[in-house]
C-alpha cells in the first residue's frame, strides 16, 4: 500500500510540474520563467559536480577499509595503545572516525563509526553512551575537515567561494568543538552519566551544572583565542591567555580548573582595561 501511495504521489507531482511548464509556455508574461528554470537546472548540475566527486572518493576509502580488513586491524591497535595511554587511543579513534565519516549521511555515519570504532572505546572502559557519542561526533565533524569536507563543498557554490577555503575556515572556527568529546570521556557528567567526586560531596545536579559551566567557558575562551574577538579586537597576549585558560578548563588534571578560572578572569580584566584605556566602548 505504501509503495502504491508513493507511486501515486510521484505521478501527481510530475503531472503538476508538467501543467506548470505548459502554463508558462502558453502565457506570454510567464514565458521568461522557462529560461530561469533552464538556467537553474544547468547551475544545479554544475554545483553537484564537486559533491559527486567527493562522494566517489569516499566510496573508494570506505571500500578499501572494509575489504582489506584495515578497520578491524586498526581497532586492535587502538585497544593496544589505550592499555597504556587512553588519550592517544582517543586521538587515534578521532582520526579513524574523521576518515570513516567522510561524506556519509548521518544515519550510515553512526552505523559505520559505532560498529568499527565504538567497540574499541568500550574495551577501554569508556561508558557506552559516551563512547557512541564520541565516535558519532567526530564522524559528523568529518563534513568540515579537508580533503572531503562535503558540507563545505556543498556550501561553496552558494557562497561563490572555494570549498577548500570554506573547509579551512570552518575547522578554524570549530576548533574548540574538537576537544569537547575528549572532555566528555574524562568527565562523563557532561553527558549526564555517573557522577564523580564532586557529585558525591555536593550532589549530581551540582556536578552537572559545574561541568557544563566549565565546558561553555572553555569553548568561549578557545573561540576568542582562534577568532581574536571578544568585547573588541583581542591582542596576541590576550589570545594566548584565553587559549591557556581554555586548555586548563578542558583538561582533567588536579588544580587545572582553578588555573583555568583564574586565567579566564585575568583575560577578562586585561581585555576590558585595554579597551577602556584606548577609549573603545565594549561591544
Image (cartoon, grey):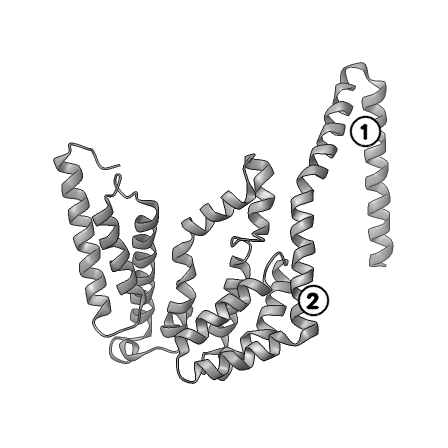
SS for tag 2?
A: helix
**Front one among 91 and 251:** 91
Residue furthest to the top in view is: 28
Marks 1/2 in contact by CB < 8 Å: the verdict is no
- Residue labelled with disc 2: 63
Q: Position of residue 113 (x, y in %)?
A: 58, 69
Q: Position of residue 182 (x, y in %)?
A: 40, 68
Nearer the observer, disc 1 or disc 2?
2
**Front one among 209 and 92:** 92
Q: Position of residue 67 (x, y in %)?
A: 70, 73
- State which quarter of the image contains the C terminus: top left
**Front one among 159 and 16:** 159
Is 161 rendered above or below residue 238?
A: above
- Residue labelled with disc 1: 20
Number of residues whose C-alpha sits closer than 10 Å to that of mark 2, classed few (under 14), some (14–19) or many (20 or more): few
Task: Judge from the rendering whether residue 172 lies leftward or rightward of residue 153; answer left or right.
Answer: left
Task: Judge from the rendering whether residue 238 lies leftward or rightward of residue 57; answer left or right.
Answer: left
Is 75 rendered above or below residue 271?
A: below
Q: Position of residue 146 (x, y in %)?
A: 53, 53
Quarter residue 119 falls in: bottom right
SS for tag 1?
A: helix
Real-space Cα separation, disc 1 to disc 2, in angstroms: 43 Å
Q: Which of marks 2 and 1 precedes in the sequence?
A: 1
Q: Which mark is residue 51?
A: none
Amino acid at each position: 500500500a505504501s509503495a502504491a501511495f508513493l507511486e501515486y504521489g510521484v505521478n501527481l507531482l510530475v503531472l503538476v510540474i508538467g501543467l506548470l511548464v505548459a502554463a508558462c509556455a502558453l502565457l506570454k508574461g510567464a514565458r521568461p520563467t522557462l529560461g530561469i528554470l533552464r538556467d537553474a537546472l544547468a547551475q544545479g548540475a554544475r554545483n553537484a559536480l564537486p559533491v559527486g566527486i567527493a562522494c566517489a572518493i569516499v566510496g573508494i576509502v570506505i571500500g578499501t577499509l572494509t575489504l582489506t580488513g584495515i578497520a578491524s586491524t586498526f581497532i586492535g591497535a587502538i585497544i593496544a595503545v589505550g592499555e597504556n595511554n587512553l588519550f592517544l587511543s582517543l586521538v587515534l579513534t578521532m582520526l579513524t572516525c574523521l576518515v570513516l565519516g567522510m561524506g556519509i549521511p548521518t544515519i550510515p555515519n553512526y552505523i559505520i563509526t559505532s560498529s568499527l570504532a565504538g567497540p574499541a572505546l568500550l574495551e577501554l572502559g569508556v561508558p557506552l553512551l559516551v563512547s557512541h557519542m564520541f565516535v558519532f561526533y567526530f564522524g559528523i565533524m568529518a563534513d568540515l575537515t579537508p580533503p572531503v569536507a562535503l558540507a563545505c563543498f556543498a556550501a561553496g557554490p552558494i557562497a561563490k567561494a572555494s570549498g577548500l577555503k570554506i573547509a579551512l575556515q570552518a575547522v578554524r572556527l570549530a576548533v574548540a568543538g574538537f576537544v569537547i568529546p575528549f572532555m566528555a570521556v574524562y568527565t562523563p557528567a557532561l553527558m549526564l552519566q555517573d557522577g564523580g567526586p564532586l557529585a558525591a560531596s555536593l550532589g549530581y545536579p551540582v556536578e552537572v551544572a559545574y561541568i557544563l559551566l566549565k565546558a561553555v567557558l572553555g569553548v568561549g575562551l578557545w573561540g576568542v583565542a582562534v577568532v581574536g574577538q571578544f568585547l573588541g579586537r583581542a591582542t596576541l597576549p590576550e589570545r594566548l591567555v584565553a587559549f591557556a585558560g581554555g586548555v586548563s578548563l578542558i583538561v582533567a588534571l588536579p588544580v587545572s580548573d582553578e588555573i583555568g578560572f583564574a586565567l579566564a578572569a585575568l583575560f577578562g580584566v586585561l581585555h576590558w582595561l585595554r579597551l577602556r584605556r584606548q577609549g573603545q566602548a565594549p561591544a
